[in-house]
Image (cartoon, rainbow, N blue to C red):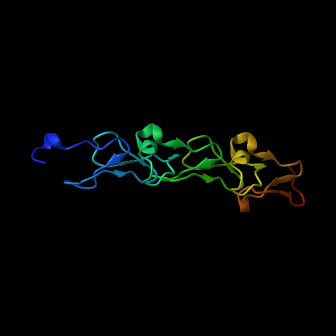
Amino acid sequence: HTSIDSCIDCEAGTFAQEDGSASCTVCSFGKYASTAFSGCTSCPAGKYITDDSETAELHTSIDSCIDCEAGKFAQEERSASCTVCSYGKYSATASTGCTSCPSGRYITDDATNAELHADLAACTNCQAGKRANAQIDAMSCVTCAFGKYS
């Protein structure tokens, strides 16, 4: 090629790894690229893209970044997936972390089912005479000590 006019822009979802590249490369997981962009941009925390450099159409814009579902989170930028909250915690859609259940409430599931961590309503109230076991992050309720009540 003799002039820059004969160079071809990379398609959305791809980028040229260096000047003089003979082809474009699909962005890796958790990243996207617009047309004629020189590099890929990381999805923000709370969002993800699972595809790893295979399908350009899955990396075309920030709209390609998928929100973490309620009960899951992605703490870092450029995530390939989201993590289910641990016991005693819940999260909203597109969260970057989980929130602890308020005092006197608990969630027993330990990061296996996002639906059980989807919102504050997922936190179960302890029965009368019991309190959330704060030592293990509100995984269960324990009986109040002699001389105390709830």
Residue 109 x, y percent position in the rendering: 75, 55
Residue 75 x, y percent position in the rendering: 52, 52
Image quarter of residue 143: bottom right
Residue 131 is left or right of residue 91, and the answer is right
Residue 93 is left or right of residue 34, and the answer is right
With respect to residue 32, does 28 lie above or below?
A: below
Q: Residue furthest top?
A: 63
Q: Residue furthest front?
A: 1
Front one among 67 and 86? 67
Residue sitting at 10 percent across and 44 percent down? 3
Residue 40 is left or right of residue 91, and the answer is left
Image quarter of residue 35: top left
Residue 110 x, y percent position in the rendering: 72, 58
Residue sitting at 89 percent across and 51 percent down? 129
Residue sitting at 24 percent across and 54 percent down? 22
With respect to residue 62, does 88 lie above or below?
A: below
Residue 68 x, y percent position in the rendering: 57, 45
